[in-house]
Amino acid sequence: DRVLACLPYLIPLLDGDRYGRFLFYAVPALGQVDFLLLGPFKALYSSIPFAQIIAFVALSTLSRNPDLPRSLRFNMQQALLLDIALIFPSLLGQLQIPLPGFLAASGSNFVYIAMIASVGYSVVSNLTGKVPDKIPIVSDAAGSTIGF
């Protein structure tokens, strides 16, 4: 049950991985670790047509299923909200505002580190039997959505 609660966090990891590109360039070993750990999942995720939409709908639907354990539903909802939060930096990146390179890299690095920290905290909490309910804003929203 603890490992199952960690699986939904693959979705924000896969969707937010692109924000680590500047870090991977600056620290090639980090890019290699990322490739080794997430490479097979990225290949599978990108080979399935509409995988992002399917994953989104599946997490959204399953997180509202009262037959599933509450902690699993909470983690599904929290992973879904983390994934939704990744939309906002993407939208900002599509604006045609010229930014200095260091600012774009810093913003991308911040998003990536915040996402890794959130997912890492959630996975470690789940594996130790605790509910990962300390992510600001996101955990409260996930809890209120499923009635936690």
Image (cartoon, grey):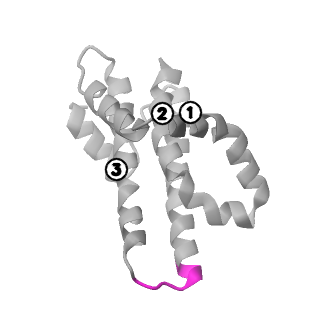
Residue 55 is situated, as x and y percent measured from the top left of the image, at 38, 34
Q: Quick check: 136 above or below 43?
A: below
Camera-side mark, 1 or 3: 1
What is the secondary structure assignment of the residue under circle 2?
Answer: loop
User: Relative to 28, is 128 on the left or the right?
Assistant: left
Which callout, 2 or 3, points at the residue further toward the start of the chain?
2
From mark 2 to mark 3, how far is it between C-alphas? 20 Å
Highlighted magenta segment, given as a residue range: 97-103
Instruction: Examine the rendering and report whether any part of residue 61 can be seen.
Output: yes
Q: Residues within 10 Å of mark 2 (few under 14, many from 20)?
A: few
Can you identify the residue that label 3 sits on?
A: 84
Can you identify the residue that label 2 sits on?
A: 48
Q: Quick check: 85 above or below 107?
A: above
Q: Quadrant of residue 57?
A: top left
Q: What's the residue type where badge 2 is placed?
A: Ile
Residue 131 is situated, as x and y percent measured from the top left of the image, at 42, 32
Which callout, 1 or 3, points at the residue further toward the start of the chain?
1
What is the secondary structure assignment of the residue under circle 3?
Answer: helix
Q: Residues within 10 Å of mark 3 (few under 14, many from 20)?
A: few
**Are the two marked residues, 2 and 3, in contact with CB atoms closer than 8 angstroms?**
no
Numbered label tally: 3
Please report the residue visible at 56 percent of the width from the left and 33 percent of the height from the top.
44
Please report the residue visible at 79 percent of the width from the left and 54 percent of the height from the top.
29
Q: What's the residue type where badge 1 is placed?
A: Leu
Q: Seen from this angle, which residue lies furthest top?
A: 67
Quadrant where the C terminus is found in the figure: top left
From mark 1 to mark 3, how far is it between C-alphas? 21 Å
User: Relative to 93, is 17 on the left or the right?
Assistant: right
Can you identify the residue that label 1 sits on?
A: 44
